[in-house]
């Protein structure tokens, strides 16, 4: 018997295969091997400062998914330079922590990250990048984020 | 630290606010769909369809597609299966009772996962279809039973007014003393005499709580009978 979290992940997987999101590519082969770990490629949207770039996201799910949010980080060499993305790949995005709800999905998170990239006008790291990347836990979910609306 | 709190993506969800009557009409269909789809299979089927990324151009030539769209109205917003033991929030979002209950126990404040409206255990309405027989529901799960639908008796003004009042709890008042055992006596008396076995206080027939209640009522009925006999003999 598959667990409820795996069952739901399979449904999301099938849905993304059937109705792919533009600019979001999932690694189906890897997912079929381990449904709890997804690698997703995000393509920088046309007409934005990330146009032509590709970034890799890693989703890790635990058995409490979708009640517990996935851990989502950028991995690989190319970490987008963005005021909410730290150089270690951690993303400061409220739906990945306190604003997560089980009605969200991998697709919704990808869309949100993509629109976060698209709305950026300047390539820059968060002001506390150095301190954060030196002191943070490996797991972004262990970070207590403080969100204040600064409209980026 | 920096932020992006305004980026949450709200999925476009099927318009579950459509009239409840409509939903009642087709729930029996769902029951059947659900039975045949409980076993997981890798082939994309109707219940795998989420509307969020669906192209809005309706393909009217494809009847199958039409069916899928209909079904997706009844997909639980959490497990993405056809909702089972379905409940609907006041904001109109559909869930399985086990799914939404799990979320309500996970996070405070209690918010609707789809629209973030404030919700609570008492602010969901169960959906009963034609064939959804609550008797055969597996209520023995370790979660609280699905809340009952609220039912208001229509005003019934013809004849036998007094008798009805008597049956509906006037009995409690008429004794006035020893309220505790008599209260139980009265309620069991009601059910014995009028075949009124509606579950009270939102309890399900068959749930442990209900059975305990039934047992207690019976015990108190006998205690009360003995007390009466004693009163008469003394
Ligand atoms: Zn569900
Ligand atoms: Zn809602």
Image: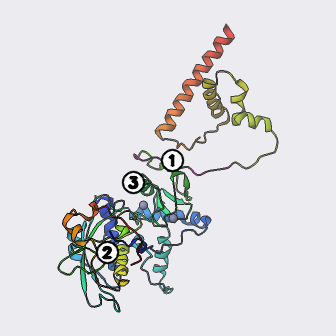
Camera-side mark, 3 or 1: 3
* Foreground pick, A140 / B64: A140
Instruction: State the image quarter where residue A18 is shown.
Output: bottom left
Share a chain, discs 3 and 2? no
B194 w.r.t. A93: above or below = above
**Which label's residue is closer to the chain start, 3 or 1?**
3
Label 1 sits on residue: B135
Camera-side mark, 2 or 1: 2
Residue labelled 3 has its Cβ within 8 Å of some atom of ligand 1: no
**Residue furthest toward the top?**
B234
B171 w.r.t. B234: above or below = below
List x then y, in percent, for residue B201. Answer: 58, 41
In the drawing, what numbered circle is on residue A84? Answer: 2
Quadrant (top left, top right, bottom left, bottom right) of the N terminus of chain A: bottom left
B88 w.r.t. A72: above or below = above
Q: Which residues are magenta?
A: B142-152
Camera-side mark, 3 or 2: 2
List x then y, in percent, for residue A110. Answer: 34, 76
Share a chain, discs 2 and 1? no
Q: Is residue A131 left or right of residue B21?
A: left
Q: Is residue A64 left or right of residue B89?
A: left
Cα distance in 3D space between marks 3 and 2: 27 Å
Cα distance in 3D space between marks 3 and 1: 28 Å
Residue labelled 1 has its Cβ within 8 Å of some atom of ligand 1: no
Label 3 sits on residue: B106
Q: Residue at x 61, y 39 (%)?
A: B197
Q: Secondary structure at mark 3?
A: helix
Q: Secondary structure at mark 1?
A: helix
List x then y, in percent, for residue A92. Answer: 32, 70
Q: Which chain is mark 1 on?
A: B
Few, some or many residues within 10 Å of mark 3 (<14, 14–19, 20+): few
List x then y, in percent, for residue B54. Answer: 43, 81
């Amino acid at each position: 018997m598959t667990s409820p979290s795996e069952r739901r992940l399979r449904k999301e997987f099938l849905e993304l295969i059937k109705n792919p999101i533009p600019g979001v590519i999932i690694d189906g082969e890897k997912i079929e091997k381990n449904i709890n770990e997804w690698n997703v490629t995000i393509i920088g949207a046309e007409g934005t400062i990330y146009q032509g770039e590709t970034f890799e996201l890693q989703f890790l799910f635990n058995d409490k998914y979708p009640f517990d949010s996935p851990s989502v980080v950028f991995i690989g060499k190319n970490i987008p330079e963005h005021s909410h993305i730290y150089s270690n790949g951690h993303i400061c995005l409220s739906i990945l922590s306190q604003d997560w709800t089980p009605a969200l999905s991998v697709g919704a998170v990808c869309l949100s990250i993509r629109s976060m990239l698209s709305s950026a006008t300047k390539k820059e790291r968060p002001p506390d990048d150095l301190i954060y990347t030196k002191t943070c836990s490996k797991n972004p979910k262990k970070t207590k984020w403080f969100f204040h609306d600064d409209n980026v | 630290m920096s932020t992006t709190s305004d980026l949450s993506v709200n999925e476009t969800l099927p318009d579950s606010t459509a009239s409840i009557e409509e939903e009642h009409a087709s729930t029996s269909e769902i029951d059947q769909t659900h039975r045949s789809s409980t076993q997981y299979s890798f082939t994309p089927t109707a219940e795998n369809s989420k509307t969020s990324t669906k192209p809005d151009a309706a393909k009217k030539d494809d009847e199958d597609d039409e069916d899928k769209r209909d079904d997706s109205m009844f997909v639980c917003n959490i497990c993405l299966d056809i909702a089972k033991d379905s409940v609907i929030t006041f904001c109109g979002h559909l869930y399985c009772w086990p799914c939404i209950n799990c979320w309500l126990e996970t996070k405070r404040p209690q918010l609707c996962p789809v629209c973030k409206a404030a919700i609570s255990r008492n602010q969901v309405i169960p959906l009963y279809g034609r064939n959804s027989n609550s008797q055969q529901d597996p209520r023995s799960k370790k979660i609280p039973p699905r809340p009952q639908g609220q039912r208001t008796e229509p005003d019934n003004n013809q004849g036998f007014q007094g008798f009805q009042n008597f049956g509906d709890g006037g009995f409690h008042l008429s004794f006035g003393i020893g309220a505790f055992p008599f209260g139980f006596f009265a309620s069991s008396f009601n059910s014995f005499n009028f075949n009124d076995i509606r579950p009270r206080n939102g309890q399900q027939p068959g749930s442990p709580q209900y059975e305990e209640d039934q047992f207690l009522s019976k015990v108190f009925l006998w205690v009360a009978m003995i007390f009466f006999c004693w009163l008469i003999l003394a």
